[in-house]
Amino acid sequence: MTIQTALIIGVGPDEGLGATLCRRFAAQGLHVVVAGRTAEKVEHVAAGIRAAGGQATGLVADATEEAAMVDLVARAEAIGPLALAIYNAGNNMNGDFLTMEAAFFERCWRIACFGGFLFSREVLRCMAARGAGTLIFTGASASMRGKPFFAPFTAAKAGLRALAQSLAREFGPKGVHVGHVVIDGGIHGEKVITGVPEFAKRLGPDGLIGLEGLADIYQMLHNQPRNAWSHEIDVRTHREVF
Ligand SMILES: NC(=O)c1ccc[n+]([C@@H]2O[C@H](COP(=O)([O-])OP(=O)(O)OC[C@H]3O[C@@H](n4cnc5c(N)ncnc54)[C@H](OP(=O)(O)O)[C@@H]3O)[C@@H](O)[C@H]2O)c1
């Protein structure tokens, strides 16, 4: 039987969303291509999956580079047809607007939006030809609304959401399920716990969104039958005011 692959770009620490999604879909029997910018991180996640009896390959790729995305998708497809692809690369760049350098704004957009275009174009070239597959984008509160000091991130995430919507409407009728997950709040993972420890401590585990609960949502989206697809799902803790 042909092995099917799941390609996840934007994988970092073990206790992060990218890594959690990799483990979840490996447990579902897919060969997971673990992709990210840092070799040690992707190798560590892939090795952990293999040690647990799953199938995984770690590949280093920068989502903002066109040649890297073309090569990444080709290498994933060479392992097996892509059943699932997730664009999880993101950042949370913020700063004072009046002193903001143009390059800062552009860097944020390249990671959180433009990379989504490069990745999805390559993925959809494969999936649309087969008339099957799931493509999911990771969003944030910023996908839905702007906030002081977050203009670049908001512009980028809103753009990614608009891209996802356009693709859902264009490629749904061609058999590809396109989803967008709005993560409305901080994630209980390494980025927040070590990056902003005071914030994490103040909210506690119950005030941050759980990784396994998030993985449930991505898995549910991927496993939906084609006569009952969701495009967008938002998720937050019970304490979030929205
Ligand atoms: N963390 C939160 O609280 C939170 C809240 C709402 C939404 N989100 C969204 O959730 C997603 C995952 O975020 P996370 O913070 O939990 O991180 P994560 O999934 O643990 O890791 C994401 C990884 O993406 C990698 N990455 C960044 N830019 C990349 C690029 N250009 N090419 C390839 N890989 C790249 C980074 O790798 P390196 O570490 O190697 O640079 C980073 O570690 C993002 O889209 C983010 O916007 C996060």
Image (spheres, helix red, strand yellow):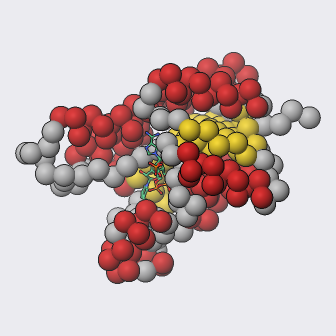
Residue 114 appears left or right of 29: left
Residue 102 appears left or right of 161: left
Q: Nearer the viewer, residue 143 or 126?
A: 126
Q: In the image, residue 239 lies at what x, y percent?
A: 41, 76
Instruction: In the rendered view, tell whether residue 151 sits above or below residue 27.
Output: above
State the quadrant of the C terminus: bottom left
Q: In the image, residue 231 lies at what x, y percent?
A: 55, 42
Q: Nearer the viewer, residue 126 or 141?
A: 126
Which residue of the protein is positioned furthest toward the front in this rendering?
40
Residue 24 figure quarter: bottom right
Q: Is residue 118 visible?
A: yes
Q: In the image, residue 27 lies at what x, y percent?
A: 77, 56
Which residue of the protein is positioned furthest toward the right in this rendering?
1
Instruction: In the rendered view, tell whether residue 195 sits above or below residue 27.
Output: below
Residue 36 appears left or right of 83: left
Q: Residue at x 34, y 81 (%)?
A: 202
State the quadrant of the N terminus: top right
Residue 160 appears left or right of 149: right
Q: Is residue 179 visible?
A: no
Q: In the image, residue 100 lies at what x, y percent?
A: 14, 43
Total count of labels: 0
Q: Residue at x 56, y 45 (%)?
A: 39
Q: Nearer the viewer, residue 51 or 63?
A: 51
Which residue of the protein is positioned furthest toward the left in this rendering?
98
